[in-house]
Amino acid sequence: RQAEFAKLRDTPAITADGQRITLHTNAGLAVDLENLDATGAEGIGLFRTEFQFMVSEELPRLDSQTALYKLVLDTAGTRPVTFRTLDIGGDKVLPYLETTEREENPALGRRAIRLGLDRPGLLRLQLRALLTAAAGRELRVMFPMIATVDEFRAARELVDVECAWAKRRGRELPALLRVGAMIECPSLLWHLDALLPLTDFVSIGTNDLFQYMFAADRTNPLVSDRYDPMSPPALRALAEIQRKCADTGTPVSVCGELAGRPLEAFALLTLGFTRLSAPAGGVGPVKRMILSADLAAARRGMANLLGSSSASIRGELETLARKLNV
Ligand code: PEP
Ligand code: MG
C-alpha cells in the first residue's frame, strides 16, 4: 500500500471526470516538513503553530518563532503554507504561560483566538514573527475558533497594526498577504454573509465544528464517536458553507481529520469542495480516491442521501462509492 501511494506522489490530483483537486497536508513541527516531499502534497493547508509552544519549556521568543516559520517557508518553496495562529488554552495548557489555566469546560473555554485577543501582546508577537519570516514572499495566516465576525475583524486589525509597525521601521513586508478564518464554531454558519466579504479565504476545522454541532467532546471516547460526521446535518452544514463560499468567490478548504479519510473526502468532493488538507498519512489514500472518482455521477447520488432521516449515511455512501468504482 505504502509503495502504491508513493508512486502517486507526483501524479496530479485530478478526478476521473477531470476536476482538479488541491490536496495539501497538515503540519506543526519542523519534522513534519519531510512529509511534503514524501506525500507529494501540494502545500501545507494547516500549520499548527501551537506545537512549537507545546514542546517548548518556555515561551518561544520572537527569534525562535521567526526561525521556525522561515524554515517552513524555505522548505515549502513555491508550495503555499497556511499558518494558523496559536490555538492554545482550553485543553492545551502551557505551564509557563500564566494566562492559560485549568477550566471546568476547556473545549468551551478561553482557547485560541479568544486568548489571542485577550492577550494581544502574545498574538502580535506571533504575527510579527510571521511577517518577518515571510518578508518578500506570500504569507497566508488564519485564526482559529472564530465565533463572531467581530473577533475576526479584531484579529485582522492586529495584522494591520503589525504591518504598520514593520513599515515604520522600513522592514520588507510579505509580497502577498492573505488573511483567513477557520470555520469551526457553528455560530459562523449563520453569519457567513457578513464574514466572507472580510476574509481572503476560509478553512473548515471539522474536528471542532462537529464537536460543537453534536455537543460531544472530541477528547472523550465515551462520546466522541457517538455521532457520525457522515450524517445529513453535518454534511448539509458543510454544503451550505461550500455554497456560500462559491457564491462569494471565497476560497474554502477543509482541514479537519476527515479530509484525510477516503470515504469522507469523497463525500466532501461530492459536496463541491476542491481543496482538502489532510494529515500526512491520509494524502496517499485520498489521492487514490480522487483519481478514481467521477464526481458528476456521485453528486446525483449525494443529493438524495442528504434528504435522509438517518443519523448516518455512511453505509449508503460506501455503496455509492463502490457502485462508481471509487
Ligand atoms: C479542527 O478543529 O478540525 C482543526 C483542524 O483544528 P484542530 O484539530 O487543531 O483543533
Ligand atoms: Mg480546531
Image (tube, helix red, strand yellow):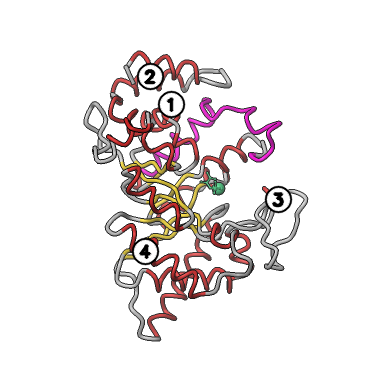
The magenta stretch spans which residues?
A: 218-246
Q: Earlier in the sequence, mark 2 or mark 4?
A: 4
Q: Is mark 1 within 8 Å of ligand 1?
A: no
Which residue bears the numbered disc 2? 321
Q: Which mark is residue 106?
A: 3
State if disc 1 and disc 2 touch (CB < 8 Å): yes
Q: Earlier in the sequence, mark 4 or mark 3?
A: 3
Secondary structure under the numbered disc 4 in the rendered image = strand
- The spot of residue 217 in percent (x, y) is 67, 39
State if disc 1 and disc 3 touch (CB < 8 Å): no
Q: Nearer the viewer, residue 120 or 93?
A: 93
Which residue bears the numbered disc 4? 139
Q: Nearer the viewer, residue 96 or 114?
A: 96
Compute the Cα span from label 1 to label 4.
32 Å
Secondary structure under the numbered disc 1 in the rendered image = helix
Compute the Cα span from label 2 to label 4.
37 Å
Which residue bears the numbered disc 1? 263
Q: Earlier in the sequence, mark 3 or mark 2?
A: 3
State if disc 3 and disc 4 touch (CB < 8 Å): no
Q: Is residue 26 magenta?
A: no
Q: Earlier in the sequence, mark 3 or mark 1?
A: 3
Q: Quadrant of residue 216?
A: top right
